[in-house]
Amino acid sequence: MSDTAILINTAVAVAAIVVLIVRFKFNPVIALVLGSCYLGLAAGLGVEKTVEAITSGFGDIMAEIGLLVAFGVLIGAVLRDLRAIERLVDALLRVVGPKRIPHAMALTITTFLQSIYLDVLLVISGPLAKAVAPKLGRYGTARMATALAIGLECGIVFTVPGVGALALAALLHVPLGTYLLYGLIVVIPTVTISISLMTFALTRGWWKPEVDELPQPAAETALAAAVRSGGPDALAAPKTRQAPLLLLFTPLLVSLVLIATGALADVVEWKNPVASFLSSPVVALMLGLIGTCFVGRKYLGQSAVEESLGRGLRDSGPILLLNGVGGCLAAVISQAGLGDILGEYFSANTWAPLLLVWFMAAALHVAVGSVTISAITSAGLLAPLAPVLGLNPVLIALAAGAGSLFMVHLTSNTFWLLQSLLGQTTRGTLKTCSAGVSVASVVAMGPILALSLVL
């Protein structure tokens, strides 16, 4: 089959996936598998090779991140019931004060809390942000909503064990420790600079509380509705003895330090079998889960921990399936030879490939409205391109993550939860969420392009 035909069929497959999700409300898992089937057959792989590519692609991704996603979600489920997030925000407020709380809260969410399922994290942290907002004056709601939106969405794609970060690392075969280190290099300045830029704009006349915020009674009603949408226990937590705050997060922090240690050991070419074992991501996160469960058993009780783990297992199912079918599309695209075709048009000694990655992920996100789906789909499309270009795959993964943040809009569940939980109008949410995260999407390319000069 000609190169042109393969390019056209790939475009048709991606467009079909978008239409199935947006227009016909297909589940993304089904849409991605159907798109993979079409591409394999249309590209001339035949029935047997198409099915083999789809199943092997799914299996390869599950082998790389299946346990990582499950362990991360389970850690988050126990931390949620230990009221770790609420207590952490209270501690931050005491330490940094109201003036710096937007930056502090966003950076904490984006770096340390990504094991907690996004909707759960948002439903818990949203009311906390709303309670802090009056301490910041006239623009408090705008500043806290923007910080929350940027922190949540950036964490998904840049920070291990964020769902998008795990998928991007797996699809592009980036060691998880490497992604963790470079993701932090990108996400910390991105969040800090983006919030500062948005604060400047919002407090210079762009934010108008009379039209961008809901009247107080309406805001309270919307908040109650949002809490109900998260389930009857969305904000409730079992009454427990108070565990030391540092103890709550120590197991997770130890896991991340072990993973980072493994990456640094690879850089300096230090080999030690015990260190290699403990720093492998699966073992490190398993140790974090065991430690978190021990803390939970002491302060919640065994039965409450089992209930937390049960909820975590239910949450992890959809995440695992979505990540797995991203592998299906990537495998079919690789078999179709798209990487070799696209590689002829781009040179590794320019920034054009990274900008292409960003643009493709951004376009997919505008069309689909999901950060995770757009990141996974764009990474799957471009995974075969990495070896052809000679670019470090971590750069492509980070650029895909950055592009997938562009223009969170009205098809996103995060958009509506932020609107309800923070008491904003739709117009206000377009400013704090859509514009704020889009600024972060663009700002993130600064550190990524800087890294491309040294990697």
Image: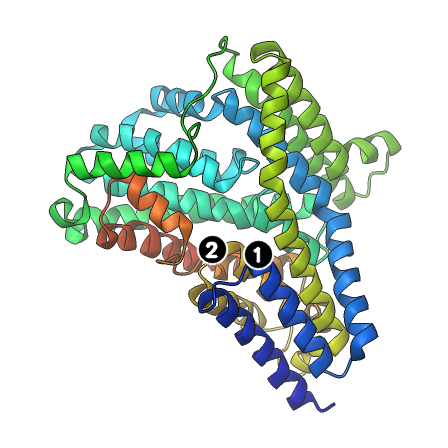
Q: Residue 290 versus residue 280: which sits nearer the camera?
A: 290
Number of the label disc, if any, that sits on residue 398: 1
Name the element at disc 2: helix
Front residue (pair 325, 450): 325
Look at the image and tell me whether residue 146 can be seen.
no
- Would you name the residue on which mark 2 appears? 444
Which circle marks residue 225 in the picture? none
Q: CA distance from mark 1 to mark 2?
A: 9 Å
Left or right? Give the position of 225 relative to 397: left
Q: Earlier in the sequence, mark 1 or mark 2?
A: 1
Name the residue located 47 percent from the left edge and 64 percent from the top edge: 368
Q: Position of residue 78 (x, y in %)?
A: 57, 25
The front one of 85 and 423 is 423
Mark 1 near mark 2, Cβ–Cβ under 8 Å? yes
On the image, the x and y values in percent for residue 2 come to 71, 91
Q: Position of residue 366 (x, y in %)?
A: 42, 66
> Given the image, on which type of amino acid does mark 1 rest?
Leu
The total of numbered circles placed on residues is: 2
Q: Looking at the picture, which amino acid does disc 2 mark? A: Ala
Give residue 115's position: percent from left, percent from top. Answer: 57, 36
Q: Residue furthest top?
A: 241
Write the residue at 36% across / 44% down.
417
| Residue at image point 62% right, 16% down | 303
Q: Nearer the viewer, residue 217 or 242?
A: 217
User: Circle 1 — which element?
Assistant: helix
If the image is split into quadrants, where does the C terminus sit? bottom right
